[in-house]
Image (cartoon, helix red, strand yellow):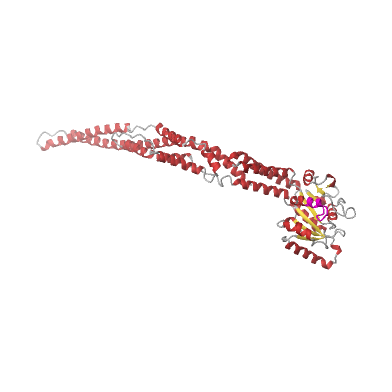
Amino acid sequence: MSTTIDHTPADTRAGLDQDALNRRGARIANAIEVAGSRIPPDVAEAAQVELDRVDHRLRLGVGHTVVALVGGTGSGKSSLFNAISGLDFADVGVIRPTTAQAAACSWGSTAAELLDFLGVDPTRRIQRDSVLDRDEHRDLEGLVLLDLPDHDSVESGHARQVDRLLPLIDLLVWVVDPQKYADNVLHERYLRALAGREDSMLVVVNQIDTIPADTQEQVRADVARLLSEDGLQDVQVLLTSVREGTGLEPVRDRLAQTVASPSVSARTARAQLEATASRLRSHVGATQPEPDDAQTTAENLATASGVPAVSESIRAAVASPRQVALSPTQRPARSRIDAIRERWLAKATAGMPERWQEAVTAQVPPVQAFYDHLWRALSRVPLPDSTEHSARRMRAIAQVLLTLGVLALAAAGVLAGLGWLGMTTPPAALIWACAGGGTAGVLAAVMLRLIARRRRRAAAAARASAYLTAVTDELRTVVTTDLIEPTREPLAEHDQVRRALVTP
């Protein structure tokens, strides 16, 4: 079965991972700084400790994939180490019956800082970087292969080394032999405690050449059964013989697959960062509050202050042909203004934890100050003139024309009636002149009255609207000055912190 492997250079993959993780850590650290006391100090302090720990891990680099060969005395893991590396470096049986210290081989770089952190002695390290076969080993660049101390050594220090290094390993390769794969120490002390790490585990049954060929698959099945009983499902089991050089290619392919995946350092760092961010997220709102804008709030305040009613009285007064006095704006009910202010603050802090709510509300003026500012804004806008003077003049002229027209028509009637009385009839031209002049005067008066009424109505609508707009503008200034501007910074900081903790 062929395996597709990402041959992107390990340091390039690591750079992408590490840059993203560094940026994520920096955003979380900045969020803690921006939030300040609005996140409980003990929570912020614990989160900073976690970030420092991740930062230390990231400084080691996440481009190194750590694979550890783990096994008991005589399992042949050191021989497997030498076979994979192509170097005769690890101690094998005839040199030393047990592996007393961890040995390491790194591909592509010395990984010195990582190996220092892992506690591998400098004399037990070797770098696999040869120009002669570099292409053959390119898919292993970034690999750090460890030959760990024998887990069943009589020296307790060996077991402690194994215990300390296990949580730092990307792939655990358990090397067993056909005679001791059911060893109780292996299963009870180690494997059963590693349930859940199946995807980062491989079991290699080495020295398979020491048993008949027709029993080899039976051994593989028996090992898989024991692993299943340990709670480790679907762990890959490979059969090898280092001495005969068989079964090594599948082992090497598995290492290459592991190298091509994000390292445990990257996964662990990412998991730690997300766990830290998750704990901090409970101290900000799940969403960013959306308070009413200044215009909407100003209109609500205008309505509560009776401004639309005053505007309507202006419209009616200016539209009336009679002189009408305007009533000045009255002080609004304090309770209605307070309710609008509280409603705005409730929306501005909706969903926020208490510390953030306090940080927002502490910035706005107290209720009495807000009410006083609103009343001054209402008082600053004067009432307009209730009379449309040009329309008034037109109406006066129309009255004169109407009077003259009626008189002219009356005169025409009188002149025409003289003939019926047997008196001398006036010239017809005079009669018609009086009648025509009177009719024209009446029509002109009607037209002027219609024009004057239209002008009064237009002026009434304009002055009422202008007053309402002017007052609303003044109230919008109060809302902006007393509510929006003071809370802009804490709200922006809450949004910044929230986004930093939510965005991966």
Residue at the right extreme of this rendering:
94
Position of 141 with respect to 472 (left or right) is right
Q: In the figure, residue 74 lies in which quadrant? A: bottom right
- Residue 405 picture location, percent across and down: 22, 34
Q: Which residues are magenta?
A: 149-162
Position of 347 with respect to 102 (left or right) is left
Identified at 19% across, 33% down, the residue is 407
Q: Is residue 476 above or below residue 244?
A: above
Q: Is residue 149 above or below residue 440?
A: below
- Residue 408 picture location, percent across and down: 20, 34
The answer to which of 500 and 294 lies nearer the viewer is: 500
Q: Magenta stretch containing residue 438, yes or no?
A: no
Position of 126 with respect to 167 (left or right) is right
Residue at the left extreme of this rendering:
422
The answer to which of 17 and 405 lies nearer the viewer is: 17
- Residue 48 picture location, percent across and down: 66, 42
| Residue 122 appears in the figure | yes
Q: Magenta stretch containing residue 151, yes or no?
A: yes
